[in-house]
Amino acid sequence: MNARLVSAPLAIVLATLFAMSPPAFAERSDRDQPVNIEADNMTVDDRNKVHVFEGGVVLTQGSLVIRGDKLVVTQDAAGFQNGVATASGGKLATFRQKREGTNEFVDGEAERIEYDSRNERARLFNRARVTSGGDEVRGAYIEYDAITENYLATNAPGGGKPAASGDTRVRAVIQPKNDNKPAAAQ
């Protein structure tokens, strides 16, 4: 099993996808770091190109850390990977990665985090939250297209029509970005 092939799409998308400020990229050096995956159990189906990690799953690559109860990585005939991180028992799958050139981190959580490497698109489903710096977005569904650097956040699972009951609002907190701050008093 080639660990770089298994998690490279997750590393790439989570490295760049969740920036809520102007485009903020994760540590470039993360891509060159080895991928380490820890879990209680691992199942590999080489014929169908499916790798399943279960039980306290922790994926690390440089500053990137993904945690969940289960991580399933599939590979299509063209070599593109799809990854799905999930949690159970009311917990959430999480990720954290340092942004390039800053001491800030991008953090996210959801019941399910999916990544499609062919389309370079990440999706967070159910109780989704992404923070970058002091900015935060919450909704039932958050999608990021790494090619166009566009965000979609809805309070409808899968980006569809919101449920008839409950809160149907997306929440965002965007901190002021003041580039003209006065110099500190000497």
Image (cartoon, helix red, strand yellow):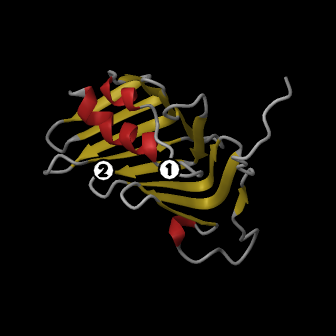
Residue type at mark 1: give it: Pro
**Alpha carbon separation for disc pair 2 and 1:** 19 Å
x then y, percent, for residue 175: 74, 50
Dot 2: element: loop
Secondary element type, mark 1: loop
Packing grade of label 2 (10 A; few <14, some 14-19, many >=20) is many
**Label 2 with label 1: CB-CB less than 8 Å:** no
Q: Earlier in the sequence, mark 2 or mark 1?
A: 1
Name the quadrant containing residue 137: bottom right
- Name the residue rendered at 18%, 45% in the picture: 48
In this rendering, the answer to whether 180 lies above or below 46 is below
Left of 117 or right of it: where is 165?
right
Considering depth in this image, is 144 or 186 the residue closer to the camera? 186
Taking the spot 66% from the left edge, 43% from the top edge, the residue there is 90
Instruction: Identify the residue under disc 1.
Output: 23
- Residue 1, position in %: x, y? 20, 27
Task: Name the side, left or right, on which 16 lies relative to 166.
Answer: left
- Residue picked out by circle 2: 117
**Which of the two discs, 2 and 1, sits closer to the camera?**
1
Q: Looking at this rendering, what residue extends furthest in the front direction?
A: 186
In this picture, residue 83 sits left or right of residue 163: left
Q: x, y percentage for residue 163?
A: 65, 74
Q: Nearer the viewer, residue 166 or 120?
A: 120
Instruction: Count numbered badges in the picture.
Output: 2
Q: Amino acid at mark 2?
A: Ser
Callout 1 environment at 10 Å: few (<14), some (14 to 19), or many (20+)? few
Q: Identify which residue is drawn at 34% across, 30% down.
A: 31
